[in-house]
Structures are given as structure tokens and as C-alpha cells.
């Protein structure tokens, strides 16, 4: 069906679709929403599989000992497995066990294609209302989940077996979120979409973004610095694999795919809990205890030794990064708030910092996973520990900063204290009117609004004038 029909009075306003330069887009023949979603889902799946099939074929030609199987069927099944890995679907390998530590960077490929698909669906089906964005996302998500399930069944071999339930659920969730984001962006620019969010929730969202951006930047700097320090070990691990020119390119792409995982692990390291790379191992600011690790060049950046060998000022900067994220979250929350609220400012700051901490814990849980059924069954940070510590460090520092910033703002501008909130969540500042000095009165003019409690005596200057 199509959702572009006129809505009854009182419904959500229509959002005109804009083209380049802000001019309205010309109308095109409309397709049914279900048909447009199915076409978009098939196009995204075909595009992602085509890219990964090309890369897999290059690896099979340049390094035939990779074990991809015999001929083109083996290449296609390997590409299907990689495509499912890009959706964070676990694989069970015969003789090894479950493999769940997957490169998060591969999620960007189907995610970007699904965002573009969502934008195309709102154009093809002529969706013009924001309340219909969910329908457009579901129209893409349902067929996409069926396609991921079909690829999981077709990619099974005696050696590797993708998880069918994970394929269906992960495909549906990724398509729902990414295509919904693209559909909303296809209807209006980000600035207009932000206008549909209340002022108070928008300030909290801005605080969460500030905290996550600070943590990401700190993790990227820490991971990159550790890799630069262990660059010699990285080169030695690459030379030991002797991948050849084509294999070296694929190895570099694999390293880039695991870069988001490395950043999240660095954030967990800065928060304090750190991460593990196998049972009985730990990598934390206080020291590291590692066993044998796989021959993967990115793992050369792991710090080793029972004690931290970094200088004190670097260790202090690493441990201070989460608190800095909380400080920025509190400042941004107060800065973007509609009105200063002395009592509630710490609460909103803690909400922003706590939400960022919960999202950090979820990312930590997704960044790790098993690498088999043996000693490497536990790899990566603990999502519960990282989330709890992040909520405490980032949330509390954001709450304290928001309270202090709000108090300083009210002290500098005492007339900006917040009044009662209206139905939309906005508050008007209370303004204390200054007393108006009494105007100079002419003789004989009585100010009847000021009776002074009935004790004022007025003199009539015209009393006794016989001409009046």
C-alpha cells in the first residue's frame, strides 16, 4: 500500500521533500510501500554480497591456501559468511568452536547501504509524513531479515555454520535502525528533524553525544599510540604470515575492520576494568597478564607485563579521559538546556552521562566474544563491568559539572531562574519587576490606588474658590 494519501485533519504535518539547494523535488510515479521496501532490501543484499565476493575472489586467487573451498561455490559461500559477519552474526567452526569476536567495522558496509535504501524508499513510495517513517523502515526490515536468513542457510558448509536465529534477528534490527534513519533523513534535514524533539530531551541528547565523542576520541588516541609504540612487533607479525601483495591488502582491510573493536577496548582500558584475551588473562591500567595470542598483527598493540610501563603523566591522562567526557557532557547539557534549573540540573547531567555509560557498556559487549571453545572462550571487555563503571565515572562527573555550571549561570544572571514548565516542556524565566518610582503628581491630582492604609490626608487646593 502507499502511505502518501492525505491525512485527516489534526494529524502530523506533512514534511515536503527537498532536493539540492532546498528546492522541492519533482513528483515521480509512486510505488507501493511493500514493493519499494522489497526492492531496496534486495538491492542492499546484492550490493553487499557483490563487494565481498569480489574481495574474497581476490584473496582466493592471490592466496589459494586460505581454505575457502574448491572453485566458485567455495568463494560464494565464504563471501556469504563474511556478509553475515558484517551483520555481527556468530559462526561455529568445526574443530574450533563458536567465533563471536567479529569486526565491527564491517557493519558500516550494510549500514551505509541500508541508510541509502531508506532514503530511496521514501522517494519511491512518496512518503511525506514523519509518522510513516516506521512503516518505511519495516517495509525494508522484513524482507531483509528473510534474505539474511536465506544467506545463512546457503552459506553453511561442513566447516563453518552461521547461526540462523542470529542472522534473522541481526538483519532485522540493523535494517530497521539504519533504513529508518535514512528514511527520516530523506524527508527533512537534520536541523528540521531536531526541531521535532523537545528542548529538554534535545539537551540530554547533545550531552550524550559529547560524552561519546570524547570517549571515542580518547580511545582512538590510546589505541593508535599503543600500535605506534609496538610498530616493530606489528611488522614482525605481518612478515611471519608472508601474505604476499594481495594478502597484505586483505590483512590491512581486516585490521581496519577490527579498528572499532580496538577503540572500544581502549575505552574499557581507560575506564579501569580493561579487557581479557582468554581465560585467566587481564589487560588493565594496573598491569597485564597475557598468554599466547593468535598471529594477528593488530594484537601486537596489546600491552604486556605485570606492571604498566607507561609514564605517570600518560597514565593519569588515560584515567582522566572518562571524567573529562563527563565534564563535557554536563557542560553541553546545561548549555543546550532551554532554561537553567538549579535543582534539576545535576539530575539531567547524570541522565546524559549515565546514558552514555550504558551505551558504552553495550558497545563493549558487542566488541568481544569467543574465539573458540578452548582458552579463548572469553575475549574482550565485560559489558556489565564497563557499563557500570562508565555510568559511575561519566554520570557522576556530568552531574557535578552540570550543577556547578548551572549555579554559576544563575549567579551571573539571577533573573534567569526557571519558572513553571508548559505542556511542551518549556519553561519561562521568572522576572522580578523593579519597583516603579511614583511619578511626580500635579497639585490636586489624587492617586486613588495608594490609600496608605486609610491614613493619608489629602488637601483640596480649590476648596473655598467661589468661582468654581
Image: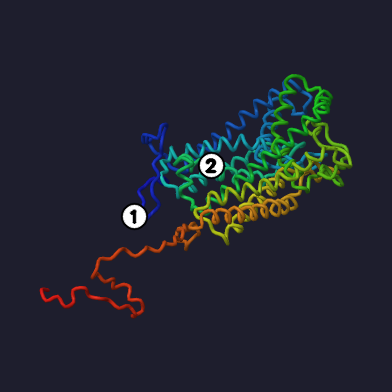
Report whether residue 373 is seen: no
Residue 1: % across, % down: 42, 46
Quadrant of res 289: top right
User: How many residues crowd mark 2 within 10 Å: few (<14), some (14–19), many (20+)?
Assistant: many
Residue 449: % across, % down: 31, 72
Residue 220 in the figure: left or right of residue 275 = left
> Observer-nearest residue: 340 or 62?
340
Residue 233 in the figure: left or right of residue 160 = right
Extreme residue in the left direction:
467
The residue indicated by pointer 2 is 179
Rendered image: mark on residue 9: 1
User: How many residues crowd mark 1 within 10 Å: few (<14), some (14–19), many (20+)?
Assistant: few
Residue 332: % across, % down: 58, 48
Report whether residue 206 is seen: yes
Q: Which tag, 1 or 2, sits closer to the chain's start? A: 1
Which part of the image, by quadrant, shows the C terminus?
Answer: bottom left
> Observer-nearest residue: 179 or 73?
179
Residue 465: % across, % down: 14, 75
Extreme residue in the bottom direction:
454
Relative vertical location of residue 180 with respect to residue 45 in this rendering, above or below? below
Distance (Cα) linking label 1 and label 2: 28 Å
> Observer-nearest residue: 445 or 322?
445
Label 1 element class: loop
Relative vertical location of residue 198 with respect to residue 433 in this rendering, above or below? above
Relative vertical location of residue 466 with respect to residue 369 in this rendering, above or below? below
Amino acid at each position: 500500500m502507499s502511505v502518501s494519501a492525505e491525512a485527516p485533519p489534526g494529524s502530523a504535518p506533512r514534511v515536503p521533500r527537498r532536493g539540492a539547494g532546498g528546492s522541492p523535488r519533482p513528483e515521480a510515479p509512486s510505488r507501493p510501500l511493500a514493493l519499494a521496501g522489497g526492492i531496496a532490501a534486495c538491492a542492499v543484499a546484492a550490493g553487499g554480497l557483490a563487494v565481498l565476493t569480489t574481495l574474497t575472489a581476490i584473496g582466493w586467487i592471490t592466496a589459494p591456501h586460505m581454505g575457502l573451498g574448491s572453485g566458485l561455490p567455495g568463494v560464494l559461500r565464504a563471501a556469504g559468511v563474511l556478509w553475515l559477519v558484517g551483520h555481527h552474526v556468530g559462526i561455529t567452526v568445526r574443530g574450533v568452536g563458536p567465533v563471536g569476536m567479529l569486526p565491527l567495522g564491517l557493519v558500516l558496509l550494510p549500514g551505509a547501504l541500508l541508510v541509502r535504501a531508506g532514503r530511496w524508499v521514501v522517494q519511491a513510495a512518496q512518503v511525506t509524513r514523519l509518522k510513516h517513517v516506521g512503516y518505511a523502515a519495516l517495509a525494508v526490515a522484513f524482507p531483509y531479515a528473510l534474505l539474511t536468513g536465506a544467506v545463512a542457510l546457503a552459506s553453511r558448509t561442513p566447516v563453518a555454520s552461521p547461526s540462523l536465529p542470529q542472522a534473522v534477528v541481526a538483519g532485522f534490527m540493523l535494517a530497521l535502525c539504519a533504513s529508518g534513519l535514512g528514511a527520516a533523513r530523506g524527508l527533512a534535514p537534520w536541523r528540521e528533524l531536531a526541531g521535532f524533539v523537545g528542548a529538554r530531551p534535545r539537551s540530554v541528547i547533545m550531552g550524550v553525544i559529547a560524552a561519546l565523542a570524547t570517549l571515542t576520541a580518547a580511545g582512538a588516541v590510546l589505541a593508535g599510540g599503543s600500535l605506534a609504540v609496538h610498530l616493530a612487533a606489528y611488522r614482525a607479525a605481518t612478515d611471519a604470515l608472508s601474505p604476499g601483495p594481495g594478502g597484505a591488502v586483505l590483512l590491512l582491510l581486516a585490521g581496519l575492520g577490527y579498528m572499532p573493536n580496538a577503540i572500544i577496548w581502549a575505552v574499557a582500558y581507560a575506564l579501569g576494568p580493561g579487557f581479557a584475551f582468554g581465560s585467566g588473562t587481564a589487560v588493565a591500567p594496573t598491569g597485564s597478564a597475557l598468554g599466547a595470542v593468535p598471529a594477528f598483527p593488530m594484537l601486537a598493540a596489546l600491552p604486556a607485563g605485570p606492571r604498566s610501563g607507561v609514564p605517570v603523566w600518560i597514565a593519569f591522562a588515560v584515567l582522566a579521559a572518562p571524567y573529562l567526557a563527563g565534564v563535557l557532557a554536563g557542560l553541553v547539557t546545561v548549555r543546550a538546556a532551554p532554561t537553567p534549573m538549579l535543582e534539576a540540573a545535576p539530575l539531567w547531567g547524570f541522565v546524559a552521562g549515565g546514558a552514555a555509560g550504558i551505551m558504552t557498556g553495550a558497545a563493549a559487549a558487542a566488541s568481544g566474544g569467543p574465539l573458540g571453545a578452548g582458552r579463548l572462550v572469553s575475549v574482550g571487555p565485560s559489558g556489565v563491568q564497563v557499563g557500570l563503571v562508565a555510568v559511575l565515572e561519566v554520570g557522576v562527573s556530568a552531574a557535578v559539572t552540570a550543577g556547578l555550571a548551572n549555579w554559576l549561570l544563575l549567579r551571573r544572571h539571577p533573573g534567569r531562574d526557571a519558572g513553571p514548565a508548559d505542556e511542551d516542556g518549556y519553561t519561562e524565566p521568572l522576572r522580578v519587576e523593579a519597583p516603579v518610582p511614583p511619578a511626580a503628581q500635579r497639585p490636586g491630582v489624587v492617586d486613588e490606588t495608594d490609600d496608605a492604609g486609610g491614613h493619608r490626608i489629602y488637601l483640596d487646593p480649590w476648596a473655598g474658590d467661589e468661582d468654581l
